[in-house]
Image (cartoon, rainbow, N blue to C red):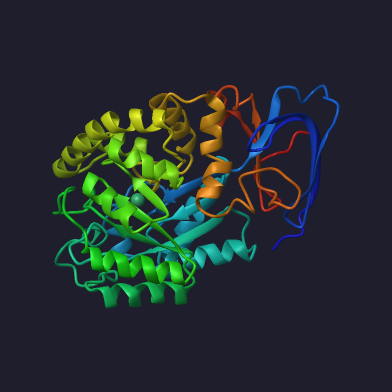
Amino acid sequence: MTNANGRIEGIALWDGDSYRGASALAWDAGRITSVDATDAETGKAEFSIIPGLVDTHVHFDGYAGAGSVDWMTWPLITPEPERSIHVLAHARRAAAAGITTLRDLSGSSVQLAAARALEAGLVPGPRLLVHGAVGMTAGHGDLFTPPHYPHRGPVADSPDECRKLVRQWARSGADGIKIFTSGGVLSIGDKVGWRNQTEQEIAATLDEAHALGMLVAAHTHTAEGVDIALKFEVDSIEHGTGIEERHWETLIERNIPVAPTLLINDAIAERRFTVSDDASEKARAVVAERDRNFVGAAAAGVRFVLGTDANGIFVAFGDQLEELRLMKQVFGWTDEHALKAGTSDAADAVRMGAHVGRLATGKGADFVVVRGRPWENIGDLNRENIVAVVARGELVAGALPA
Ligand SMILES: [Zn+2]
């Protein structure tokens, strides 16, 4: 909670859906109290205001300090309280780049602690949503831990175990659940094409999560995995590499969001960082299939929203701005479509549309002052052009124009 208040006026404002012209924005106690039209003010013509961005798919539990560490072993050998502080550092870095709501899709007590600290206003920063994973032994989620390492995250290997793990996540305060309906790229020793869990296990997870009011995000890279995700009515598709023409109708009819995670698979495929031969080979296959599948899906009207898989290593917190430019390019979108996919539509996708993603009275005071007009040119939205970021009414980066 915050008592921060403020007012900025005579500045171009894009409210998450459309351009509103020169406006005045006022906020108090972390919420927007008014958005009104005003005369344009000289001195602010080069600036504009947009809602804070929403990234629907990140991973905060990694090393955030200077220098480099082995990304896979660091979380295994570092105590949880210390890891939570690194989560805060990643979160504040994201906020400084204008991303003011982020959803972690492999959460644990590490991210939940940081989310609650931010919510309590201990440090100014973005809003974090945390999903707990429900996956099988030898599934994508399980194989981030080397096979013979004894201290492992929870797995669930029967419908009853799935139900129990969902309930445990609900008890711990998680906002939602993550499932896997195929293998993955960075997991060790599996194949992207592996089935992850039986239909009975997936059905139990979905039933229990929805009964407890939790959204379910489904990681999948295969066409079969998309079939299963749609059959059991998941709330979002993550990666979605295997989306084929036969899936378009259901995806569009149910308006299911897809997080395309373009940048990270490109980065691993092109070995912009040190990755195993196996991981880069898997990523190259994923990228080739994805590029074939996504262009048609986007043209048909499948709903893609900002979801990067940012983890501070392969994709930095702040690279979301580049992901939006890439989405515009790959999907053939207008600039405004790309900006909606990273603000209002992404907020709706994670069921936060009543609170963030748009600038309107009563919503959270989460916004970015930027040099340029990103709804006309998404390229204007880059780190150098960010003038100020406000999250929950508090300045988290830069300085508001006088
Ligand atoms: Zn992910």
In screen coordinates, is 142 left or right of 376?
A: left
Q: Residue at x 29, y 33 (%)?
A: 293
The total number of labels drawn is 0
Q: Is residue 92 above or below residue 267?
A: below
Q: Can you tell which quarter of the image residue 357 is in? A: top right
Q: Position of residue 117 (x, y in %)?
A: 57, 65
In-front residue for pair 179/89:
179
Residue 360 x, y percent position in the rendering: 73, 45
Q: Quadrant of the C terminus?
A: top right
Residue drawn 35% across the image and 36% down it: 262
Left or right of 49? Residue 63 is left
Q: Residue at x 18, y 56 (%)?
A: 195
| Residue 328 image-quadrant placement | top left
Can you see residue 157?
yes
Instruction: Tell which of 3 and 398 is nearer to you.
Output: 3
**In the image, residue 186 lies at what x, y percent?**
24, 49
Residue 160 sits in quarter: bottom left
Residue 333: % across, % down: 47, 26
Work out which residue is located at the far right of the displayed protein and give it. 39
Note whether 73 is above or below 42 in the view shown.
below
Q: Is residue 260 visible?
A: no
Q: Image check: 225 left or right of 329?
A: left
Quarter of the figure that contains the N terminus? bottom right
Camera-side residue: 363 or 67? 363
